[in-house]
Amino acid sequence: MKDHEGLTDLAHGPKVGARGFWKPNSRVGVIGGHGEMGRLFTNFFKDLGCRVDIADVDTERTGREVLEDSDVVLFAVPLHETVKIIGDLVPYVRPDQLLMDVTSLKVGPVREMLRSSAAVVGLHPMFGGRIATLAGQTLVACPVRISPESWGDIRDLFIQKGIRVKECTPEEHDRMMSIIQVLFHMTTMLVGRVLRELSVDIAETMEFTSPSYRLEINLLGRMFAQNGALYSAISQMNPYTKDILSSLMQGLSSYQEWYQGQDLDAFMRDFQKSAEHLGDFCSRAYEESSAVLDFGVRLARLNGGP
C-alpha cells in the first residue's frame, strides 16, 4: 500500500481479525441503516443469519449504543458526513470488532477507521441501493487491516451471492474513481449546465432525436434525478479531482482554438490519437452500444415515443 498521509503507518500493527466475524447470530450494527445502501446491506446481513441492529437519525438507539453491541459495524452514511461520524465513534471501538464502510471514497473513511484498534475493510459497492439482485454486481474492497483468513471468509460470502470483488488500496480506489465517477459526472454536469444556460427545451430536442442522443440524454436525466449532495461530495472530496479539471480545461481550450481557426485537421488528428489510445475497445464498444441503442429504439416505440 502506498503511503498517504500516514495511512500505511496506521494500517500496520498487531494482526487483527480472528476468524468468525460472519457466523449465525453474529451481531451486525449498521450506522445509517435507513438509507438505501443501509437497507440493502441490512437485508444482506439478515440473509446470512446475522442479528442486525440499526442506528440512524430517526432511531431510538444511538450509533454508540449500536456499535458497542456489535461484532461487525458497517458505516452506510452520506459521504460528506462519513469521516466525522466514524471519528466520533472510534473511541468506543473494541479490538475484536470489524469496521467497514460503503462510501464512494476510501482514503478518508479508511484512515479514520484505522485510528481504532479494530479490523478494517473499506468497501465501495459499484451499484445503487435499488438493484433487483446482487448477482453480477461489482464490489470494490480495501482489506487494509484484517487477517487473510478473516478477509477470505468475508470475500467468499460476497462471491457466493454472485458479487464480483475487486481488491485494491484506498489510494488506487480514489484514483480510479476520479475517472469512473468524477470525469463522467463532471462532463455530464457540464452538459446539463449548457442546456440550462441555453434554455434548451428537452422535449423539443426529442423530436429531432437519434438513438444515441436518446441514450445520452436519458443518462443525463438519470443523474439529475438523484441526490445532488452525493455527486457534489464525490467530485469535491476526491483528491484527484484537480487533475481531472485541469485536463478538461486544457481540452476545452484546444477545442476552442481549433474552432476559432477552423482547423479541421487538428481536430481530426486529436480524434485519431484518442482512437488509437482506446484501441480494440472501440470496435467492441461499437457493437455493444449498437445493441443497446436498438433496444432503446424498440423501448421508445413501445412507450409511444418518437
Image (cartoon, helix red, strand yellow):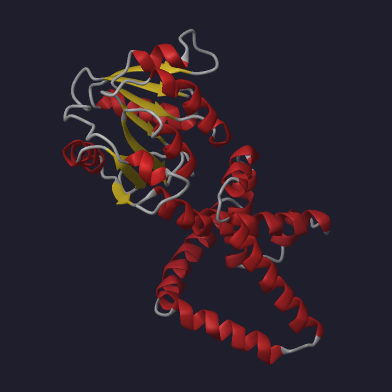
Q: Nearer the viewer, residue 87 or 55?
A: 87
| Picture coordinates of residue 104, whole percent (x, y) | 48, 43
Which of the image's four quarters has the C terminus?
Answer: bottom right
Residue under the point 23% across and 27% down: 48
Along the line of sight, the residue nearer the viewer: 47 or 31: 31
- To which quarter of the image does residue 30 belong? top left
Q: Is residue 271 left or right of residue 48?
A: right
Say whether residue 305 is visible: no
- Quadrant position of residue 162: top left
User: Residue 266 in the image: x percent, y percent?
Assistant: 67, 88
> Residue 280, relative to residue 185: is it above or below?
below
Q: Position of residue 134 (x, y in %)?
A: 33, 41
Hey, which quadrant is residue 71 in on the image? top left
- The image shows residue 51 at horizontal and vertical percentages of 28, 17
Residue 204 vertical placement versus 159 (above, below) = below
Q: Residue furthest bottom?
A: 265
Q: Classify residue 160 as left or right of residue 36.
A: left
Q: Residue drawn 23% across and 44% down?
A: 159
Number of dots carrying numbers: 0
User: Does the image show residue 59?
Assistant: yes
In the displayed structure, 121 sits above or below 140; it is above
Q: Residue at x 22, y 31 (%)?
A: 17
